[in-house]
Image (tube, helix red, strand yellow):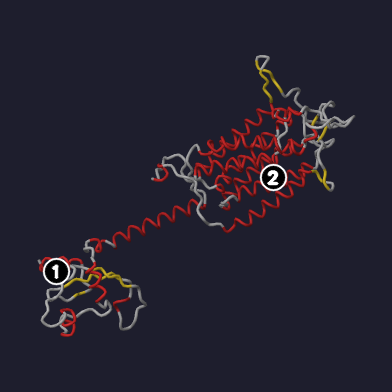
Amino acid sequence: MPLASIPSPSQGVWHLFGVVPLRAYALCIVLGVIVAVVIGERRWRARGGEPGTIVDLAVWAVPFGLVGGRLYHVITDWQLYFGPNAPNEPIEALYVWNGGLGIWGAVALGALGVWFGCRNRGLSLGAVADTIAPGIVIAQAIGRWGNYFNQELFGSPTDLPWGLEIDPDRPGTVPGVDTYHPTFLYESIWDLALGLALIWVGRRFALRHGRVFALYVAGYTVGRFWIEGLRVDTAHHILGLRLNQWTSIIVFIGAMIYFWYARNKTNDEQVGMTPELALGSPGAEGSIDPAHPSDQADDEADAADTADGEGSSRRGEPEAIASTPGEGAVAAANAVDVEESADPAHPADQADTSGPAGEEPQDLPQSVVVTEPAREPGADDERHKVAAEKVVVPGKDGALHEDVTVDAVSEGEKERR
């Protein structure tokens, strides 16, 4: 006899008003869903997402997850409901409240439901998956206590002080043995620790694009593999391992492949922004977490962009008052070699700009803006140290002049009038 043990609850079902059954297993599932949504909602708003998004996505994920979990259980343990020696009636395959949800099916179809929701809202699936991963595994930690109330899925016999007492009439018990490994407790503790680790790792390394979710899947499969080996309930065996152990191996490999593949993803993730967040209101809900490295980098980039924009605006002021050149302006600008300005004192330049002898000068635009590319500075060319914008305007003599300031343009126009 062990010196100490964990007693099992005397009942797992209570009847309200003597009619309505209230099952502990269902309560644990509902409580886990609520906790997962609350954690996910807080994390989503901390990333700058719109409040209420995770609640809306849960409307898709929860039904899909329940159906997927039950399907996986029924498919892998079909002998419990179908066949001449089945201990349960086929209709009982629909009785979710009696226990029996396969986590692999729940995650697979639950993810499909989230994908539908993200597609309808235009959100990045990877961002949502990273946000809800810690909440999901903590919800699993809570849900495992449903197995405790049902006295099911326990482990092999043990004399450890934390051995779990199981009713001798329960399926899977060994005659003469009173205590068994509390696999529900092992997995609950493992899941809780994993959830906290995911929160820390996600913040410490700024993981994105579904990599936190991949770590959740990989971490859960590691724990599930060794805990599954302790269980004594009926299961299919392949090469000495239980079916769920093989599933854990395959899923672990897939999760690690994705974690490695997504390491170089750098594109932005769409999380949606509320109007308050878009305006940068300090008191708005869902403000970006300043402790997150990626958020700090985004803030610095935004500040730099703002400074560049203001500088560009100030530099562009002279260009704003220049008149818009028409077709004649473009032709005139093309006819002028911007690298060799026309000298009004030079006869050749006067002849070139005035056209053939005896003809009146053609109408020229009031002003033309010509942008020169940047050049390397030279010893004899001080004009091309930096890129410059030149304002080319006609003078009184009809010749085009460059390097004219805005004020000079204005005075020249006044004198021309």
Q: Position of residue 83 (x, y in %)?
A: 82, 32
Disc 2 to disc 1, C-alpha distance: 79 Å
Q: What residue is shown with label 1?
A: 412
- When asked about the image quadrant of residue 30, the answer is top right
Q: Is residue 167 above or below residue 204?
A: above
Q: Position of residue 119 (x, y in %)?
A: 53, 44
- When asked about the image quadrant of residue 189, the answer is top right
Quadrant (top left, top right, bottom left, bottom right) of the C terminus: bottom left
Amino acid at circle 2? Tyr
Amino acid at circle 1? Gly
Quadrant (top left, top right, bottom left, bottom right) of the N terminus: top right
Q: Position of residue 278 (x, y in %)?
A: 41, 46
Callouts 2 and 1 close, C-beta under 8 Å: no
Which of 72/103 is in front? 72
Label 1: few (<14), some or many (≥20) within 10 Å? some
Which of 385/261 is in front? 261
Q: What residue is shown with label 2?
A: 220
